[in-house]
Image (cartoon, helix red, strand yellow):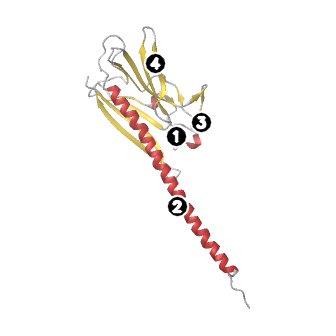
Amino acid sequence: MKRKGFTLIELMVAMVIMLILLYIGLSSFSYISSFARYIQVNQNIQDNIDTLLSQIKKELMQASIYNDSSGFSGVTFPSYNPSNDSKRSLQDLVNPYPLDSSHDYYSFINSDPILQFYIKDNNGTTHRITYSLGVPQNNGSYSGIPREYWLNKLYEPCEVLYSNETWNGTTWTGITNQPITEQVITNFTVIRPSYSPKVFQIIVETYLKAPFSKEGKKFVRIMQITLKQ
């Protein structure tokens, strides 16, 4: 009497089918997981930029374009030029820009900020507000994202650094160079058009990696502010 069962060929065919189904399932899971991460990273970047622009707008609207002769008023950077647009960006702070084959990281060569202005609080205290760019440091050494993980090898991702200082009669004290974004900003530009000293154009750029791709896309947000004072 013959015993019923599967032949070797039938078992092999069944195993191949199971492997194909398993591969499809894992591929689908991997795609969904990568896409979900892409959505999360995209949202984080937008949250970073929204926070930055919202804070700049709130504070800059309290600034005056006029100097009250105290030395601590008006807008210091970028300066206003009635002949040409004035611009401050990452390019003014680092060398080289963009990076070349002989440099792994930016070398920050200029201590001048991208945006600096003065405001007075409800008590009449003068605050010096400063926005600049930088990268994480630990005892003077770079401790940020390694270059192999940058989304664009030519542009190092930076943090936006924030300072809010008050004058005590001899020195400025308070919050200095506090990161207010993650290390995702690839450029931060402030433009003062020549046609009006009250107008500021803020441009923030970053790169976002697309799922299942080694490439990324540039993400740009633009905001224009007109001072009321």
Mark 1, residue position: 154
Furthest-bottom residue in this view: 1
Q: Is residue 199 visible?
A: yes
Mark 2, residue position: 28
Q: Secondary structure at mark 1?
A: loop
Disc with the residue nearer the chain's start (1 vs 2): 2
Give the image location of residue 211, x and y in percent: 50, 53
Given this view, does label 4 or label 1 mark the residue nearer the observer? 4
Image marks 4 and 1: residues in contact by CB distance under 8 Å:
no
Quadrant including the N terminus: bottom right
Give the image location of residue 222, x and y in percent: 35, 38
Q: Residues within 10 Å of mark 1 (few under 14, many from 20)?
A: some
In the rendered structure, which amino acid carries the disc numbered 3?
A: Ser
Disc with the residue nearer the chain's start (2 vs 4): 2
In the rendered structure, which amino acid carries the disc numbered 1?
A: Leu
Mark 4, residue position: 174
